Amino acid sequence: MAARLVLSLNGCYDSCSLSGGASIKFIVKSPLNKADVVEVRYDCFCGCKPRAQYQRGTDEANHEHCCCGQVHFVGAQAEDRLKAYLAERATTGMDDDVGGYTLHAQQVKAPWGDPVAVAYAVPHHPRKH
Ligand SMILES: [Zn+2]
Ligand SMILES: [Zn+2]
């Protein structure tokens, strides 16, 4: 079975311009009483507020896949994990309807001062909210 996955990578480390001209403004902060956790969220164009957390010092990453098809990963190897996640979905054609993704990778600064990787994929044909 051939995996169909259309990916293009924009390695942008400051701010990213999306195809629609908008750019994601990530909101980076620690949840209440969790100084060792960073939560990275944004206001999606579809109206949702996807959020993902990273626990300081761990090798983990977490993600949220928005209803419109946009997905972001936060944490260790965020970019690799995002690619693996999309590749896995592609093997069963789960994302055929969005026509591929444009990938973006950047770093945000955690409240404790360290850089944290954020990677996100923008679907070429977003789903309806
Ligand atoms: Zn969305
Ligand atoms: Zn939505």
Image: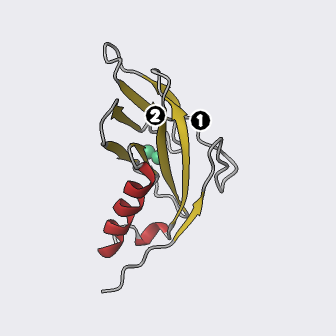
Percent x, y of residue 66: 41, 48
Q: Amino acid at mark 1?
A: Lys
- Which quarter of the rendering shows the N terminus? bottom left
Number of marks = 2
Percent x, y of residue 65: 38, 49
Name which residue lies at 47% across and 66% down: 98
**Camera-side residue of 22 and 104:** 104
Residue 9 image-quadrant placement: bottom right
**Quick one: label 1 or label 2, which is nearer the N terminus?**
1
Percent x, y of residue 106: 56, 45
Residue indicated by mark 2: 41
**Camera-side residue of 81 and 102:** 81
Residue lying furthest right:
21
Percent x, y of residue 77: 40, 50
Name which residue lies at 38% across and 44% down: 76
Numbered circle sitting on residue 59 = none
Q: Is the CB atom of the residue marked by disc 1 within 8 angstroms of ligand 1's nearest atom?
A: no
Name which residue lies at 48% across and 49% down: 119
Name which residue lies at 50% across and 70% down: 99
**Where ligand 2 lies, by quadrant?**
top left
Residue indicated by mark 1: 25
Secondary element under disc 1, as helix, strand or loop, is loop
CA gap, disc 1 and disc 2: 9 Å
Would you call the spot at circle 1 few (<14 residues within 10 Å), some (14-19), or many (20 or more)? Answer: few
Q: Is the CB atom of the residue marked by disc 2 within 8 angstroms of ligand 1's nearest atom?
A: no
